[in-house]
Image: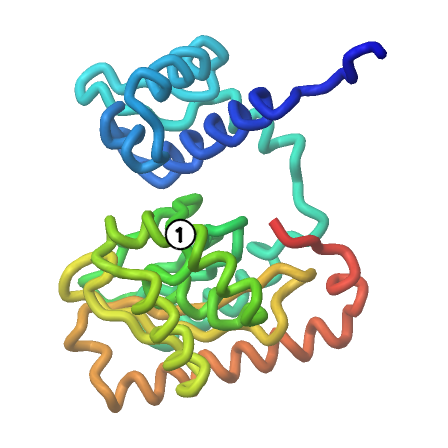
Amino acid sequence: MAKQAGLGRDGAQVVHKVLSLLKEVSASRGRGTKLTALAEAAGLPVPTAYRLLAALLAERAVERDEATRGFRLGPLLWEFGLAAAPDVDIRRFCAPALDRIAAATGDSAYVNCRSGDDALCLDRREGSYPIQAKPIAIGNRRPLGVGATSLAVLASMPSNEVDAVVDANAARYRRHGLTAERVRSAVEATRARGFAVSTGRIVARFRGVALAIGNGVGGVPVALSVIAIEERLDLARIETTVALLRREEQALRALLASEPEIQQKGSMP
């Protein structure tokens, strides 16, 4: 019998390894991350990571900063992105809400969505307050459950999916000073409270407050948030900020209800 064509197990594993590296490169942003750190983050031996990154460099999928020797995403992925427009443009859908939140609070407003086992920062707006929180760049990703917006996204998901994501991210949580058990506890606290709060998880002295948008947008879990220096988000201001986020969330859900085709299109990243 002829051998069945296809990648086979080894080929599929290579694909998973390459994508794990690309996700970690994406998370680094800025001037990139060095080989050893990427290998550790992706759970790969350094020689394996080096060979894969060398191939990605040759294809322009990653590039290397000559000064820092750190890897960052290359132009090929930007070119792919031009051809990969989503069925539902969540950024455009949430843009007016972000504008209003940043204007009303004076602080930074964010929207994140689920992307596999990660939260992806889709967009942000800066407010008028002189000190703005910029811990997460647009396009940055981090494990679901790390930071307020990411935690709100995770808590909005069905429990069986939460368990699968937390199990998959268990080793990655350690790099953020977390354990799977602490993330599960934070999910339960978020659900009981109705919103997520996180202090100093991404950047010291900054606090985030986040609220998920109903059942998501186009089938994708999505959350809005406000991030500010800790002193600006005391208990009293958290209450007013959550009230603002709830109004915007309700307005977005009403818009979704009036345009049901949006909910029909999307699929889980």
Q: How is the image coloured?
A: rainbow
Q: Secondary structure at mark 1?
A: helix
Most foreground residue, 185 or 24? 185
Q: Which corner quadrant of the image does residue 177 belong to? A: bottom left
246 sits left or right of 131 in the view: right
Image vertical order of residue 42 relative to residue 97, above or below: above
Q: Residue 13 at what x, y percent from top left?
A: 53, 27
Q: Residue at point 66% right, 40% down?
A: 85
Point out the residue furthest to the front here: 1
Most foreground residue, 144 or 205? 144
Total labels: the figure holds 1
Residue position marked by numbered label 1 in the rendering:
169
Q: Quadrant of the N terminus?
A: top right
Amino acid residing under circle 1:
Asn
Q: Residue 219 at what x, y percent from top left?
A: 67, 61
Q: Which corner quadrant of the image does residue 133 belong to? A: bottom left
Q: Residue 140 at what x, y percent from top left?
A: 39, 45
Image vertical order of residue 154 relative to residue 33, above or below: below
Image vertical order of residue 189 relative to residue 172, above or below: below
Q: Residue at point 35% right, 67% down?
A: 183
208 sits left or right of 82 in the view: left
Q: Residue at point 53% right, 50% down?
A: 115
Image vertical order of residue 167 relative to residue 35, above or below: below
Q: Residue at point 26% right, 60% down?
A: 178
73 sits left or right of 198 in the view: right
Crowding at mark 1 (Cα within 10 Å: few <14, some 14-19, many 20+)? some
Point out the residue furthest to the right here: 1
Most foreground residue, 20 or 243? 20
Q: Which corner quadrant of the image does residue 23 belong to? A: top left
